Image: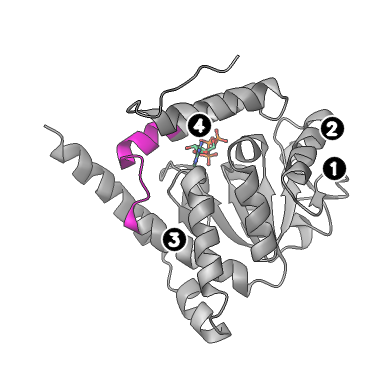
Amino acid sequence: METKIPKNHPRYESLMIRQRLATGLSRGLVHETGLIAHGRGEAFDYLLGEKTIPIALDAEKSAAARLLLAKHPVISVNGNVVALVPDDCVKLAECVPAILEVNLFHRTSDRIQRIIRELLDHGAVGVLGEHADERIPGLDHDRGLCEKQGIFSADVVLVPLEDGDRCESLRRMDKFVITIDLNPLSRTSRTAHITIVDNVCRAMKNILIWVEKLKTYNHSELELIGNQWNNKEQLHAVLQFISRRINQID
Ligand code: ATP
């Protein structure tokens, strides 16, 4: 049963996010290890001040430009992402437009179907992932399974809450990889072309706002925004932001 959390609780947002994941677990969307992954993310969110920092907002803008420039963009989702932000996944896919594909490390056909159903219930028109007919080269585990019409042939992939292995393999396939990861030190963060160091709950909304705004821009204006991102430099800036915050606490 869900605990009622008062809106004036100082940790309201964070507790609501936990509750959404716990509900996602009981509904068979989230795998139990997803809760552990979330805990790692939460710790970094705490260090960031649980807000979108300016560097992340810039990353979200560049990511939006790249998604708009793509010929075949795909948003790859897992159980945590769908339990937390189903509406934003659907709206973003519609607005870009991009394909939604479910990709799971702990893959069972029951969980894939539940996640697809959840997205369809939130208004998605079609969701890939159930009929994997291709493999990402170099990945032996189930995250390597994907659909030819989706991730396999994508030129730009948005992979929120990714693991490092798949991120590296997607890059080896010459895809442009955008990730959302609160941990600026993860392998994923260091491998992606654009890393958005922000909570997926804030990041997906911000990317959507940028996509809506940038839709009227022409190709060269979008290229200017999408190309100006230097991921290594920006991750360094995030770490500096965190260490400044830590040093300011008395
Ligand atoms: P890597 O292989 O890239 O080093 P990892 O082994 O830490 O990563 P996972 O355990 O799969 O990867 O965790 C996924 C990542 O998602 C973690 O780095 C965590 O910080 C991040 N994460 C978890 N919850 C959220 C969230 N709500 N928003 C953004 N990032 C999150």
Would residue 46 be counted in the magenta stretch? Answer: yes
Q: Locate the C terminus by quadrant.
A: top left
Question: Mark 1 and 2 residues: CB-CB less than 8 Å, in contact?
Answer: yes
| Residue bearing the label numbered 3 | 59
In this rendering, which labeled residue sits more in front, label 4 or label 1? 4
Q: Amino acid at mark 4?
A: Ile
Element at badge 4? helix
Type of amino acid under label 3: Ala
Q: Is residue 51 left or right of residue 130?
A: left
Q: Looking at numbered disc 1 in the image, what kind of residue is underneath it?
A: Glu
Q: Is residue 206 left or right of residue 33?
A: left
**Mark 1 → mark 2, Cα distance in angstroms:** 7 Å
State how far apart marks 4 and 2 are (Cα): 26 Å
How busy is the neighbourhood of tag 1: few (under 14 within 10 Å), some, or many (20 plus)?
some
Residue 130: mark in rendering? 1
- The 10 Å Cα crowd at callout 2, few under 14, some 14 to 19, many 20 or more, is few
Circle 3 crowding by C-alpha within 10 Å: few under 14, some 14–19, many from 20 = many
Query: How far is the residue under mark 4 from the one under mark 1?
Result: 27 Å
Q: Secondary structure at mark 1?
A: loop
